[in-house]
Structure formats: structure tokens, C-alpha cells
Amino acid sequence: MSAAAATGGKRQCLADIDCVILAGGLGTRLGDTLGPLPKVLAPVAGRPFLDHLLAWLSGFGVRRVVLALGHKAERVMAHVEAMETPLTLVPLVEPRPLGTAGALRFVRGSLTSDPVLVLNGDSFVDADLCALVAAHRESGASITMLCAEVPDCGRYGRVETSGRRRFERFAEKDAARPGPGLVNAGVYLFAASVLDEIAESRAASLERDVLARRAPGGIALVAGPFRFIDIGTPESLEAAAAMLGEE
């Protein structure tokens, strides 16, 4: 399928919600595969991975996307400048590697909505973001995390829950402990108050320094058997092409 097809048609639930795509990673495991390209521009099913993400977001009504850039940012900037898109794209380049939480701290001043949608720029999950927004508002939580049910958590690490709708802890990835479970799909809704906390902190990793340190039960979860893929390895990059290339 194409990324846009995942939405089942144009919707507007994210029209007033800013989106941040975290795209500053080094992509070291893909160095030989991508050459001079940053991971977010990896060619997938005939176009850059970023284009798939933007088409998917657009299907839910997203209008404004902040691109948190770092490694090889100039390549992304050139691509964005050449794009024809109705979206407002705001590329911001961190001065040095800051980590995922540090990237949010860096872009905080450019975010105006409450909540804000944040997603990793190297993964895709075929989920309904309108359902995510509705669940976030219904839960009253300041953070809602999207999780995917996968047949083997060994590569990713597990999300352990205190009930299906609340986060308990992350379990480290362990190839010796395969089997089905929940994994973090890298898509979140953050209340403005949480972004302010991050901006005032020295947190580097979003998972370790922010999410894992929240009080148990303080993060709402939306989980389902969503198709999920990251592009962190040559093998998963190839699998992404198979998923996103479907019509």
C-alpha cells in the first residue's frame, strides 16, 4: 500500500496539531546502503521515506510539520525546498547531536499546538491517528504512546503494561527472549506541559530520560496489530519497500 492509503481517505483530526518528525539520527547501520543520503531520505518503493511519512500524515489533515534535523541535514533541506506540497514544512537543524529528547528541546519554541504529535523519522506504522487523538483526549493523560503488536519483540524490546491502556516500563531488546508482544511504534502525543518539562531539562533520550521516568501508569497507550516497520537495517529497509509499495 502507499502511505496515504493507510488512512482510508482525507481526514482532518490533525489539522490543528503540530507534528514533529525526529530525523537527526546517524543511520550508522545503513551507511553502506545509503551512501550520502540521510536515513529519512532512504529510497523506499520509488520515493524517499520522508515522502511516505508526509503523505500518511497529510491523510489525517496535518498542515504543519517541524523537521528536527541533524546528520546530513543539508540533503533534507534541499529535498524539502524542491518539494511541491501543501504542507508547511519547518526544517530546524540542531547544532550538534542532541538525542531525541534534546531534539524536542531544540524545536520547542517552534511548536504552537497542544498537544503535539511526535514521530520517529525512521519507522512507519499503519495505524489510525484519529483514533490516537481521540484516545489521548479521552484518557486525560499528558502523554499517549502508540504501540504495535508484533510476533517477535526480540529485536525491538518490549513495552510492558499495567493493563492494556497504561505504560509500565520498557524491557530491553533481547534476542534470547523472542515471542509476541507490544513494541513502541515511535509515535506519541505530548501535552504542551510535557514539552515544557523537556525544554527545561537536560534529557537526551526520549525513551530513557523522559518516558521511562514517568510514574507507572502515567502514559496512556493505544495498541493494536498494526503493520509496523522501521528502516534501521538493510533488511528492514527492503521490507519497508514491500509494505509501502503496495497499492
Image (tube, grey):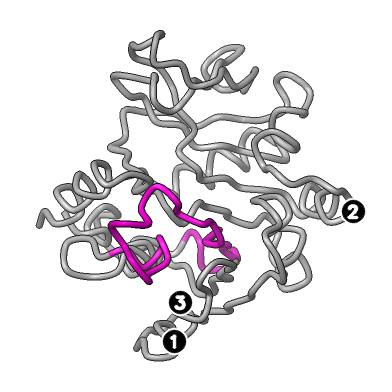
Residue 148 drawn above or below residue 189: above
Work out which quarter of the rendered image holds the C terminus and state it. Answer: bottom left
- Amino acid at the residue labelled 3: Val
Q: Are marks 1 and 2 in contact (CB under 8 Å)?
A: no
Q: Nearer the viewer, mark 2 or mark 3?
A: 3
- The residue at the point 39 percent across, 16 percent down is 175
* 104 to the left or right of 24: right
Residue 70 locus on image (x, y percent): 59, 67
Residue 235 locus on image (x, y percent): 23, 42
Residue 200's disc number: 2
Residue 40 locus on image (x, y percent): 41, 63
Residue 76's disc number: 3
Q: Earlier in the sequence, mark 1 or mark 2?
A: 1
Residue 78's disc number: 1
- Amino acid at the residue labelled 1: Ala
* 179 to the left or right of 199: left
Q: Are marks 3 and 1 in contact (CB under 8 Å)?
A: yes
**Residue interval drawn in magenta:** 13-42
